[in-house]
Image (tube, rainbow, N blue to C red):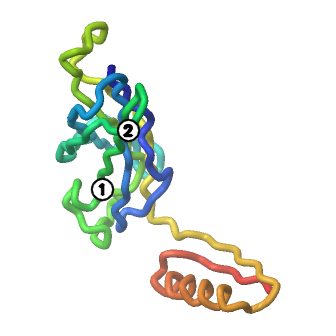
């Protein structure tokens, strides 16, 4: 039968950056069989943590996979790219009301295979996972024994992020 494991996704992300998720699907005894994965995305809490009941559920474009690998449990990982700006139709820079921010819930569905006798539901559905979307700047505290090349490189990359107001940084020598 088919089993959909937990979705791999970041716990936290920014509204101006798309993020990737991976849906691992295992097909016991279903070697080289194709399947389709659908992902549903819904904002369930606002930026202050207040539950939302009237938010729209977005269904991403379904993607096809194929069970592969040796043994009794062939599997595949299907990757999706999620951009809150595209889903809501609001650029992050114009989101004054915080409609992109908050807690988003993700679920994946895989249709039942015709040879699954004991499973009677139409879809195998994963447990919902939560991704927090917020504009809060990344905070970095950097310690170094000496100014190596790696340190200098990282410091310059982090400084550029800081000037773009995407992070806060404190350097301790």
- Give residue 69's mark: 2
Residue 153 vs 121, above or below: the answer is: below
Q: Is residue 10 left or right of residue 65?
A: right
- Give residue 63's mark: none
Q: Is residue 57 left or right of residue 11?
A: left
Asked whether the residues under the numbered discs 1 and 2 touch, taking CB atoms below 8 Å apart as contact, a structural biologist would say: no
CA separation in Å, label 1 and label 2: 25 Å
Q: Which mark is nearer the camera, 1 or 2?
A: 2
Q: Which residue is mark 1?
A: 81
Q: Quadrant of residue 65?
A: top left
Could you say which is closer to the camera, residue 164 or residue 60? Answer: 60
Q: Quadrant of residue 52?
A: top left
Q: Secondary structure at mark 1?
A: strand
Could you say which is closer to the camera, residue 3 or residue 91? Answer: 3
Give me the residue at 26% from left, 8% from top: 117
* Residue 150 rendering spot, x and y as whole percentages: 65, 86
Could you say which is closer to the camera, residue 33 or residue 62? Answer: 33
């Amino acid at each position: 039968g088919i089993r959909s494991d937990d979705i791999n996704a970041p716990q936290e992300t920014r509204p101006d950056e798309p993020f990737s998720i991976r849906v691992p699907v295992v097909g016991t005894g279903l070697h080289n069989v194709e399947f389709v994965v659908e992902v549903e995305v819904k904002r369930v809490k606002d930026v202050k943590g207040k539950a939302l009941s009237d938010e729209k559920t977005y269904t991403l474009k379904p993607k096809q996979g194929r069970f592969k690998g040796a043994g009794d449990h062939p599997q595949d990982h299907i990757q999706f790219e999620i951009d809150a700006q595209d889903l809501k139709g609001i650029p992050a820079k114009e989101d004054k009301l915080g409609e992109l921010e908050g807690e988003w819930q993700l679920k994946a569905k895989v249709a039942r295979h015709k040879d699954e006798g004991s499973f009677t539901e139409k879809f195998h559905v994963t447990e919902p996972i939560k991704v927090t979307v917020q504009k809060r700047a990344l905070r970095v505290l950097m310690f170094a024994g000496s100014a190596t090349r790696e340190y200098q490189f990282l410091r310059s990359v982090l400084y550029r992020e800081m000037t773009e107001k995407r992070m806060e940084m404190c350097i301790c020598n």
